[in-house]
Image: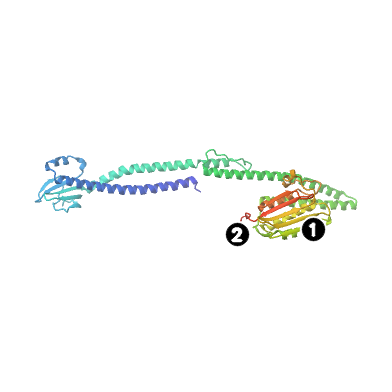
Amino acid sequence: MASLEDRLKRRLLLGVLLVGIVLAVAVRTQVNRQQRELLDYQLEQVARAMLLSDLQDLQAWDDDPALHLDMQIWDRAGNRLYRSSAQIELGADTSPGFSILPSGPQADAVMLRVFTLKSPERTIQVMHSRELRKALTRDAEFEVLVPTLLAMLIVAILVGTSIKKGLEPIRELDQELSRRDAASLEPISLAHAPAELARVVRTLNRLLQQLDASMQAHKRFIANAAHELRTPITALRLEVDNLAHGQDPAQVREAAVRLKMGVHRAQRLLQQMLTLARLEGHTNPQPWIAVDLVLLAQASMMDLSPLGSRRGIEFAFETSGSTMVQGDPSELRLLLDNLLGNALKFSPNNATVDLSIREQEEGVILLLRDRGPGIAQVLRERVFLPFVRTNPAIEGSGLGLTIALEVVQNHGATLLLEDPPDGPGLLVRVFFPLRVSDRPGNDKNQA
């Protein structure tokens, strides 16, 4: 594959060559025309000068080599008064003006460019050899074309040098990137980068910064996951040991129940970790469609109602206006399951969980209020981090709000934790704007 430098050089040097050819042709044409006009003008002016000149002055014309011409002069009776060369055998009957004639009837006659001027007293014939005219024209072309071609050569050299110098920052960027590995994510610095490449470097540095932040987050996630899994796995191992060495059937049954519950908790934790990893990596994104939040909320409450019924917790649901939003139904259902599940988990027995979904002028708003202990103001940012729990005594993985926040951000919405206007608990506010950015491929799906 040809490099950018080679392609630019080929194209620009080809352009310089084409310009040189066009310029050379134009210069040659112009020089030919001007040289022809100049020599014809010389013939005409010499003829007019000889019309009234004394024939005794012709010796001065013969001795001047710069004239490059021959001449014949005839009187009114057709007698030749003067001839500059014995090889000229033109008659006096040439037509006035310019003409092309042989120098004579001899075999080695040359072609002449003749200007004839007639008056009542004299006939003047002034002429150039065509070969002489061509030689003079070639000399004039050479004098003009050589500097022109040298100038084009200098331009070609400057083009090649300028391209090489101009692409030097790209080579520096390539060398800088080639020295790095997957762990080298510090910003790139190019001291003399042009404005166009500087924008690319800024974009690349921003991408490296985001990649570094993502890798650090994944490292923290893996470390936290390893820490969180250590406890349930240890508990499972102990229960397996108790089950293997148990003698009393009642103790064996209790160990089996505890083992089953531990497996369920570990399975739940792993499932949430995989869900969070999928949301953070945006793997297998689905095109957005119109989704009714009310239908999703009703389905989620129906699935969670048995858990609430065991503790006497009821749902109070209110809706108004259009509750349609653009999004991924599976992710939005995941959002509602986590928010409602958290509300049930932290609500006291025999309490009520209030859910409201309403249309507003700018979009759709979801309000969820429980009667639990709430979340202190200083902890409301930390609770969105993975494995952060406000109350370790309550069973959970600390991933519910993290997953909810990922879904909200993926949909261009906002999630806020607030104090209820009255009484204890926590108010969760999720706002879906009317216009959000679709995922790649969504336009095609909707079309």
Q: Residues within 10 Å of mark 1 (few under 14, many from 20)?
A: some
* Residue nearer the viewer, 420 or 78: 420
Query: Is residue 384 in sight in this rendering?
Result: yes
- Provide residue 167's location: percent of width, then percent of height: 50, 42
* Residue nearer the viewer, 153 or 23: 23
**In this figure, which residue is indicated by the disc labeled 1?**
305
**In this figure, which residue is indicated by the disc labeled 2?**
444
* Residue nearer the viewer, 225 or 207: 207
355 is higher (above) or lower (below) than 195: below
438 is higher (above) or lower (below) than 384: below
Q: Quadrant of residue 64?
A: top left
- Provide residue 382's location: percent of width, then percent of height: 73, 44
* Quadrant of the rendering where the C terminus is positioned: bottom right
Which label's residue is closer to the chain start, 2 or 1?
1
Mark on residue 418? none
Of all residues, the one furthest to the left in this rendering is 77
Q: Nearer the viewer, mark 2 or mark 1?
A: 1
Amino acid type, callout 1: Ser
Q: Secondary structure at mark 1?
A: helix
**Measuring 55% from the left and 45% from the top, which residue is drawn there?**
200
Q: Secondary structure at mark 2?
A: helix
- Provide residue 14's location: percent of width, then percent of height: 42, 48
Query: Is residue 109 in sight in this rendering?
Result: no
CA–CA distance in space, label 2 to label 1: 38 Å
- Provide residue 213's location: percent of width, then percent of height: 65, 44
Amino acid type, callout 2: Lys
